[in-house]
Amino acid sequence: MGAYETVVKVRFGDIDHAGIVFYPRISEYFHVTFEEFFADRVRLPYHELFDIRRLGLPTVRTEIDYRESLRFGDVARVEFGVLGLGRCSVTTRYRIRKKPAGPVCVDARVTVVCVDMETFRPVPVPDDLREVFLAHRVEDRDE
Amino acid sequence: MGAYETVVKVRFGDIDHAGIVFYPRISEYFHVTFEEFFADRVRLPYHELFDIRRLGLPTVRTEIDYRESLRFGDVARVEFGVLGLGRCSVTTRYRIRKKPAGPVCVDARVTVVCVDMETFRPVPVPDDLREVFLAHRVEDRDE
Amino acid sequence: MGAYETVVKVRFGDIDHAGIVFYPRISEYFHVTFEEFFADRVRLPYHELFDIRRLGLPTVRTEIDYRESLRFGDVARVEFGVLGLGRCSVTTRYRIRKKPAGPVCVDARVTVVCVDMETFRPVPVPDDLREVFLAHRVEDRDE
Amino acid sequence: MGAYETVVKVRFGDIDHAGIVFYPRISEYFHVTFEEFFADRVRLPYHELFDIRRLGLPTVRTEIDYRESLRFGDVARVEFGVLGLGRCSVTTRYRIRKKPAGPVCVDARVTVVCVDMETFRPVPVPDDLREVFLAHRVEDRDE
């Protein structure tokens, strides 16, 4: 199936004193994309993972290249894919391009770990999630 | 005792596309002030109210006049006082001036209700909080 | 034409330590709605108002009743309408209900002033905006 | 001189639906620290770099390990140091420990590039900044 894509609009309040998207907001765009991925592809609203299944997926590592700034008025196409799947962790990739098309503006690897929400200790990624993550595997090559 | 005052610095990421503090951030400055008030005057770290006493103080009404914009580089003096105290609710006032001195830039009334965190239902404001709130009573006159 | 409506999803990062949407985020939902209104109804991307026409619409007053909390997993239907139109200012109303339907959770009046971005001084609301605002007039009655 | 340190309090609104600091907020803590570093050590308020000298320092790369979560009530000691200094770029390191003491909870490398704010093109880091950055050099070893 490959990558999943969603669209995030740059908002008025995302801009910083330099007139570009404040860089921590970029990670919020990733999170919105992850939430949409859960709704659309896992078919599990992300809040149910926490509130019903009592699992969480906290971020343990990020590696982000900000190649080109985003500005107010830009519409970000955020592409999400899975680079690797461990027993308890998932390494994901996010790429942002400006709509309609263009080069990669932001390129990121984000690793999350599956935890039991009661103990915050790592637990194996459940099989149903594992299957969906594997279906969105992407290759790790530059663009 | 009257009003409590703390200082909040306008941060790089608080600025919006118009070059001023994005107005929802002003309410975040109020909340920071409320947290500091709890630490300094109630002598109860705000998180303990939630995590140990299982009480919350959600905001049920705000009325805010934004008279003058704040910009990056400004330091906000936030003044907090209590206008009225009901059985389960507290009506508070926040006023922001720029440091070192000057006219009121933001003038706000914020009403919070004391709730039981399990049920999210109103409960009477506990006596120890009531006492500290009363000690920070301010008069409701314009400036 | 009456009110304009858009949909805003409550996001993971909008939640606070009490497990509900942090109240300043509600005003961000209003702003997103205003940006969408500009794109859909004024047919002027909001950033062009600033960057090309050099006008701004800073918020000078808000009055907000938070009647029911929003939580992660909720989808907010945000209704926007115009209560009054002055020479240089517009008084607007926002109402949030949870999707699919239900009572008003948040009810707000927000007044903005049209300013020249060079001077930040009030200027008359331009005729093309005035016309669209008037077409979205709503009555000021409780619900 | 080595590392610079400042203190950032975890705020009520920084918490996410999992009950920990929403990870993009961690980068905001870094930015606050950078602003404080400018005020305290460069002796140049950060806004003057933009508004008077017309230079910016956008982030072009981040690499962050989130080893331990931060929660509401925690006070973060953020340590800032310089790992490397290029002609137009600076590679910095941020480490967060919980106050009063303890292991590194977050370990980050953040690379910024000096740009001309008119063109957003890289320019050499000015000598006065270069000197202060060099005075805060730290070694790149694990802890």
Image (cartoon, coloured by chain):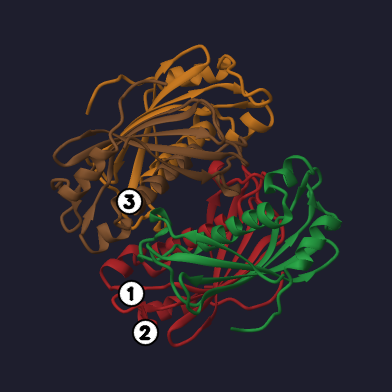
Chain colours: A green, B orange, C brown, D red
Whether residues under marks 1 and 2 lie with C-beta atoms below 8 angstroms apart, the answer is: yes
- x and y, in percent, of residue B108 in the image: 34, 31
Q: Which element is circle 1 on?
A: strand
Query: Residue at the spot x=39%, y=77% of the render?
Result: D129
Mark 2 lies on residue: D123
Whether residues under marks 1 and 3 lie with C-beta atoms below 8 angstroms apart, the answer is: no
Mark 1 lies on residue: D55
Which of labels 3 and 2 is toward the front?
3
- x and y, in percent, of residue D52 in the image: 25, 69
Mark 3 lies on residue: C38
| Disc on the earlier residue, 1 or 2 | 1
Chain letter, disc 1 residue: D
Classify residue A44 as left or right of residue B40.
right
Mark 2 residue type: Val
Callouts 1 and 3 in the same chain: no
Q: Which element is circle 2 on?
A: loop
Classify residue D90 as left or right of residue A81.
left
Residue closer to the observer: D135 or C31: C31
Which of labels 1 and 3 is toward the front?
3
